[in-house]
Image: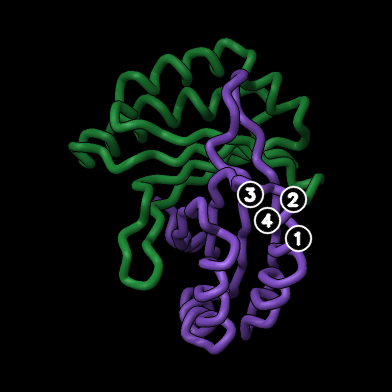
Chain colours: A green, B purple
Amino acid sequence: MSRLIVLYNQPEDPEAFDAHYRDVHAPIVRSYPKLRDLKTCKPEGVGGRPSPYYLMAEMTFDSPEDLDEALASEAGSASGRDLRNFATAGAALFIVDDAADA
Amino acid sequence: MSRLIVLYNQPEDPEAFDAHYRDVHAPIVRSYPKLRDLKTCKPEGVGGRPSPYYLMAEMTFDSPEDLDEALASEAGSASGRDLRNFATAGAALFIVDDAADA
């Protein structure tokens, strides 16, 4: 399994962020070819410190090739462009390959 | 399931970091009470950009209560103290509760 992980920084307007993610961004992500699963959650902090991120989105694929195909697709481009519409506080993106543990 | 996720920034000396993580830190984490799984991986970047993090560690527990118990244990304290020995470039820590999706 390969996962694309996106960690969103705290938005200025969490309500507007949530609405855009739910109504616009998530539907684009769900149209990725070969997407197995989209999981989102609001992280909590550890030991009394706030979470460094507001939202974590995990997109799961069967293989790194499927993930690459999704990112190269029209939906992949559209989701990248859409980040500018709501993730204005920034986000960290990376890929983890669960078959190749460190 | 509840996961404690730690994202380590790029270390100055990756080889020394890896050795410390493998030989000192991971054994402490594996002694957490009620730990179900420790998974580590080296994230890759997206779209030609480097990964913002060097190493991701995911520690899985059956429940938020088990996770809290692990953090409050002697092993939990020891792992927190040990971060100062090798994670000098910093790390982002947070908890995700997979039963409570956003």
Tell me if A90 is positioned left or right of B29 in this view.
left
**Quarter-of-image position of residue A3:** top right
Type of the residue with mark 3: Leu
Can residue A83 be seen by looking at this rendering?
yes
**Quarter-of-image position of residue B12:** top right
Most extreme residue toward the bottom is B74
Quadrant, the N terminus of chain A = top right
Q: Are marks 3 and 2 on the same chain?
A: yes
Type of the residue with mark 2: Glu
Q: Which element type, helix, strand or loop, lies under badge 1? A: helix
Q: Are marks 1 and 3 on the same chain?
A: yes
Which of pointers 1 and 3 indicates the residue nearer the eye? 1
Residue ID for mark 3:
B55
Q: Are marks 4 and 1 on the same chain?
A: yes
Chain ID of residue with mark 2: B
- Along the polypeptide, which appears first: circle 1 or circle 3? 1
List x then y, in percent, for residue A50.
Answer: 31, 60
Type of the residue with mark 1: Ala
Between marks 3 and 2, how big is the CA–CA gap? 12 Å
Residue ID for mark 1:
B19
Query: Disc 2, disc 1: CB below 8 Å?
Result: yes
Chain ID of residue with mark 1: B
List x then y, in percent, for residue B53.
Answer: 56, 42
Most extreme residue toward the top is A74
Q: How many other residues sit within 10 Å of disc 4, few (<14), some (14-19) or many (≥20)?
A: some
Q: Which mark is residue B15?
A: 2
List x then y, in percent, for residue B72.
Answer: 47, 85
Chain ID of residue with mark 3: B
Chain ID of residue with mark 4: B
